[in-house]
Image: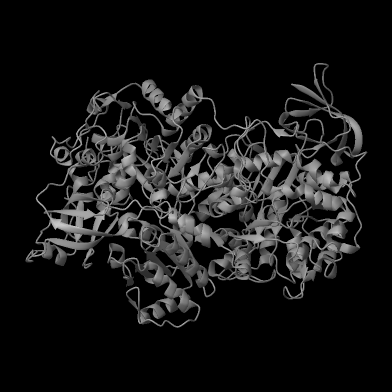
Amino acid sequence: MTYEPPITDYDHIVENCTCAFCGCNCDDLDYLVKDGHVVAVRHACRLGASKIMEDMDQRLLVPMIRDEDGELKEVDWDTALDTAAEYIANSIRPVFYGWSETSTECMKEGVELGEYIGAVLDNQATICHGPSLQAVQNAGYPIQTLGEVQNRADMCVYSGSNAMNSHPRHMARYAVFCRGYFRQRGRFDRTVVTMDPKFSDTAKMSDKWIGFEQNGDYGFYNAIRAVLKGKELYQDVISGIPKEDIYELAEEMKNAEFGVLFFGLGLTHTLGKQRNIDIAIKMVQDLNKFSKWGLTPMRGHFNVNGFNIFMAFHTGFAFGVDFCRGYARYMMGETNTIDLLVRKEPDCFMVIAADPGAHFPNGANQHLADIPVIQIDIHWGPSTELADVVLPGSFIAVECGGTSYRMDGVPIWMKKAIDKPETCRDDEWIVRELKERVMKLREEPNVLDAYEVNPNIL
Amino acid sequence: MHYANTYLEKPVVPDVKITGEGNTKVLKCMLNTGSDIYQGACKKRGSTLKQEYKNASGTCYMDPRDMAKLGVNNWDTVLVKTDFGEVVLNAAASRDAPHEGTVFVCKGPWANTIVSHDTYCCSDPTYKGIKCTVEKTDRKVLLMADLMRWVYKKYVDEEDDDVVENMESLGERPVYKGRKWEELIDHDL
Amino acid sequence: MEYILKNGIVYDPTNKVAGEKKDVMFKDAKIVEDVSSDAKVIDVTDKIVMPAGVDPHAHVAGPKLVVGRLYRPEDSRRGVTAKTKYIRGEAGFSIPSCPTTGYRYSRLGYGTVVEAAMPPLEAKHTHEEISITPNIDIPALPLFGNNWFCMEYAKENNLEDMAAYVSAMLKITKGYGIKIVNPCGSEAWGWGMNVHGVNDKAPYFDVTSKELIIALAKVNEMLGLPHSIHIHPNDLGHPGNVPTTLETLDAVKNIKKSSKATIRDQVVHCTHLQFHSYTGNSWKDAASGAEEVAKYVNSHDHMTCDVGQVTLDETTTMTADAPMEYDLFKISGLKWANKDIECETAAGIIPCIYSGSAPVSTLQWAIGLELFLHIDNPWQVCLTTDHPNAGPFIRYPRIMSWLMSSKRRMEMIDNGEVHKWAHKRTTLATLDREYDFNDIAIISRAAPAKIHGFADRGALTPGYRADIAVYDINPNEIDPSVQYEEIEKGFSNALYTIKDGQFVVKDKEVVMNKESQNIWVNVKGYEREEEKVINDIMPFFTQYYSVKWENYPVHDHYVSNPIVVDVER
């Protein structure tokens, strides 16, 4: 990247905007606005700045449907919405996937549509922190807000998470470098440990790098737990780590005043999957016998946690919620998008504010080539190459206000700073329109005449 | 109008001179995928049709010793194969090396063709820790739109991989019928 | 639209109507004295008519509820039902989803539920949940008992600034009153510790729990809030906690009630008193302290309480008393969740299996009933389960049946439905008092409404909201002492539940999704002081909170349809 002089030509600044990139939801961004466009952004990291300074070449601006040549063709909003509504109304196993990059206000419309038609609603957790949620359901969930970390933590552990690359301001704003009430010297008052097979950029910033071997996470945490329980380690090297180092680390963790474990996809994507998180949670629970410890999953999208929270309070389940029988069902590995696609169950797929084309394995995406795909998004991406209907939404936190939930569950109102392009519509409006059109096209399936109480609650 | 620019054609990689023999034809490795800051910035800016995305996501980061075994230099191309598929990628020296025997590919359509869709009943595919082979190749890394056409063939009648791979490129701009987006927005990046 | 509910047997304790046959009339959203001849007549001959229920303390909306739902799909599955023509599908038993919560309260004939703990930083979340919970109005109590600013003000005895801060925070969080949970203890939990007794200090904050409680109680009366301080004392659930409980209550007995608070009598409301009435030194020798605590209540009118009755179910406990939840984890080993909130509070969550065959559960069950039966004045005690902590709210009718039938209680003790600790360690077996329908009406609507200072509900006074419940029970024919099963059944599903003049339950079926309303207190006249206090705290806030001040308050977007209670200076 070459040096660029700062932008000085702008009309006004919109302060305290919220970044719509990762789960840090930094709410201190300043947008420099000229002629109704954001021309520069202050305080954001490289990722946030890059998203806000979007690529207008690929901005979706008009509704499109595939024509008989297999090419996308611009149509008016009515035609596009009617086509999409027909696909949904005529399906028997629709899946509405995405939601993590839109507002809870939009999700509200989505869950109403999903419950009406009997769809599966799922979000990106299914391909990132799904195993974490499953582990939380097995083992518990000791968390804290990021301000707690800032003010109290004297030990931060990043496990399977390369924060410097995926959450670049996490260490600076919330966890490591920032001054806290009880940690006035910031970085100097904290011990930072990175656990990762790679010597990642985060590891390079840490006091200690635990480079356990690939798929060695479970064994490593198991060893720490054993040491915490006063057991002796019989092997000299466990998961590639000498046992002396494990003793030393366990002792350090016990002696921390306030420790936090941040974990990322390095734990959820490897062989042990949810078992890795299980044991990490249990380790944190064990550590609380000696001092204060908590954990936080490093959520990727700015509202991926929001969807899980939203679905939990709306339907009782966090993600992968299947309404096909007229009530909410949730079963890990059955009602989740990847499993459904691999089993070739869905006959209609709506993707909103997500990009399966970019992030689903080939084995799952192959099914998208066989069924109608409706895309609601702001940019032309890999999923557009598979989409049959394209509905251009608006950019939450820049062009449209909305609620999001940070990785630690703190809700933030993301305000609107500029107007959206005239030809685009808000996500919330699009989904509401689809809902109303589907309701006209098809009578609600699976409705009981009268309430039947579940005998398990009597 | 002057906009702050975050476009970067290629990720910055260690400038190491590879002096290996290149005696190994096919190298057995462990494949990891995930995100890095170049891939994230490009993807979320929306520049997925461009060279930048191809170079950020369609790159196989390797330990220089592994590169030496194959005799590849930065930005040469390699073919990576797994039980789940194959794809042509750029080779580049990893910033996180040493990790001999392990290659890293950022998530994206390229990585998708070679990762495992097995969830083991826990919703999440296996994106990390997959056995793969890496070999030197002359084939080119495809741009995103071309890659999607080659892998999924949703809107081409042709079934043959080689034919689709060598079709005329869809390019770095959206291909569609209708008003040009430049007309809809005053934008002069 | 005008209606007459004709020939019902009315229980309206506030207006001293106890089982009279009379008509209740309402027009549009309000109860009226008279209606025109066009009024629609609903025949409710010989059926119980009461004001809609008021739950003074339940956890129904907010961040810790969601952690519960998120990590207990087994609980959600337990209550799943399919959607009907009128309502959405339900889910959940102890932690039902938001729509489910609204429907189930409607079936019980309830119209108002106070959300008992709202962390200010995450108040938006609480309000998001309130806005999608249908059919009930939900005021929420923000937490102040471990707030760093409040602890500083209390230490300096700076009541003026503290009052302005509380006043500002009620506006910022759209809150209803002052909730205090384990004062100083949840802050100590920030370091994995707790405080014990009211004279213990939070680490680094040179202030005791007692000083903080007194300061907040004084501030409450300075501002003249409709509700008193609402306190969950220290040492919850610890054997031998009776002295802490009594010391807490005694600390505020000389504080004078504000003249602006005309509806309530108390200056302190002690919540889930059952959890605070244990004697002994450990669970080995624990026994009931209910008699001693009740004696205190009977001789002091500055306080009221709700019980937190254990219902002997598998439930989910969740409280801002986070260290207590970790203690439970150490005992049960069940999956433990925790949620600390910077500079404000903490929370802990853990599933809990209360079983009649377990000695401790039984002891807790018996202590709750003892409190109900030992406290003489029903206006001082409310019916709660501290939902979901001691049991889900759908068990209220069962508790009513226990209170109305000494026979049933003895049966449970005699036939082994509960552990022998019930008669060995409590006085329950010696109590033959039985509640009548009027007492039930007091503890489930009239008293909670009075305690919270509601001036528009909890009674059938003309001009009040038309929040009415009709139960298919004939009080002249039923013998609750024997027919306790019919009592439970009758109160479990109202024949009609009317909210703001609209029939949300008709013929025992929920037929409506009525938008709920948040109730919050707007203190007027402190604007200048509030501005000063906010300026004072701003440098601290900017440095040590993880959000910007602009993004901290609950914007109007989240409370689109509030009921604002104005309090003039």
Can residue C551 be seen by looking at this rendering? no
Residue A401 lies, with reference to residue B18, above or below; the image says above
Q: Assign the C terminus of chain C to one quadrant of the image.
A: top right
| Residue nearest the viewer, comparing C101 with C459 | C101
Indicate the quadrant where residue A95 lies.
top left
Residue C334 is situated, as x and y percent measured from the top left of the image, at 59, 64
| Residue nearest the viewer, comparing A428 with A19 | A428
Q: Assign the N terminus of chain C to one quadrant of the image.
A: top right
Identify the residue shown where x is 43% and y is 26%: A85
Horizontally, residue A77 falls left or right of residue C400, namely: left
Residue C113 lies, with reference to residue A136, above or below; the image says above
Indicate the quadrant where residue B25 lies.
bottom left
Horizontally, residue B28 falls left or right of residue A327, namely: left
Residue A61 is situated, as x and y percent measured from the top left of the image, at 30, 29
Horizontally, residue C514 falls left or right of residue A115, namely: right
Q: How many marks?
A: 0
Residue A36 lies, with reference to residue A214, above or below; the image says above
Indicate the quadrant where residue C413 lies.
bottom right
Residue A280 is situated, as x and y percent measured from the top left of the image, at 45, 66
- Colouring used for the render: one colour
Residue A371 is situated, as x and y percent measured from the top left of the image, at 35, 34
Can residue C494 be seen by looking at this rendering? yes
| Residue nearest the viewer, comparing C159 with C367 | C367
